[in-house]
Amino acid sequence: MSKGFGITGLMQQAKDLQERLSKVQEEAASRTVVGSAGGGMVKATVNGRLEVLRIEIDPSVLGGGDRDMMTDLIVAAVNQGLRAAQQQMADEMSKLTGGLKIPGLG
């Protein structure tokens, strides 16, 4: 095997991996996960781009009048949703890379 062929083959493999990574990232960005807090009283829907798409609050929380509790529940639900979205992306990347840890890819 000549050096040129080896480098060319390696470059093609890198290009193929980059294309597959891009596709996986696009697919993951379109998926959503839901984080919840307070036994499901507050739910946050997050996409793979780590954007909060929706917050759902059970009416019983609204009637309680405890603003601090509601704030804590919203923050907890959003944080759980963000962690779930990050884990989903890391799982997809791990499948693609065969468990190889590549810096910057989760």
Image (tube, helix red, strand yellow):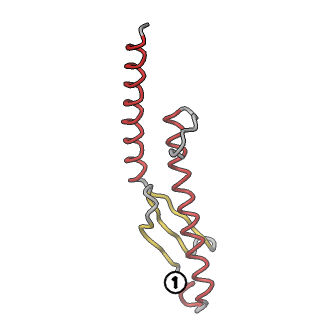
Q: 53 or 106, which is in the foreground?
A: 106
Image location (x, y in percent) of residue 47: 44, 59
- Up-down relation of residue 52 to residue 8 (above or below): below
Residue placed most toward the observer, 18 or 72 = 18
From this viewpoint, which residue is outermost toward the front? 3
Q: x%, y% of residue 70? A: 58, 83
Q: Position of residue 69 (x, y in %)?
A: 63, 83
Residue 105 vs 76, above or below: the answer is above
Give the tally of numbered discs.
1
Task: Give the residue displayed 37% in from the left and 24% down from the top.
Answer: 12
Q: Which residue is drawn at 48% across and 74% down?
A: 56
- Residue 68 falls in which quadrant of the image? bottom right
Query: What residue is shown at x 57% (from left), y 74% (from top)?
Result: 75
Q: How crowded is mark 1: few (under 14 residues within 10 Å), some or many (20 or more)?
A: few
**Relative horizontal placement of residue 25, taking residue 72 as reference (left or right):** left
- Residue lying furthest bottom in this view? 65
Drawn side of residue 42 relative to residue 32, left or right = right
Residue on which disc 1 sits? 59
Q: Report the amino acid beneath label 1.
A: Pro
The residue depicted at 56 percent of the width and 51 percent of the height is 87
Rendered position, 65 above or below 77: below
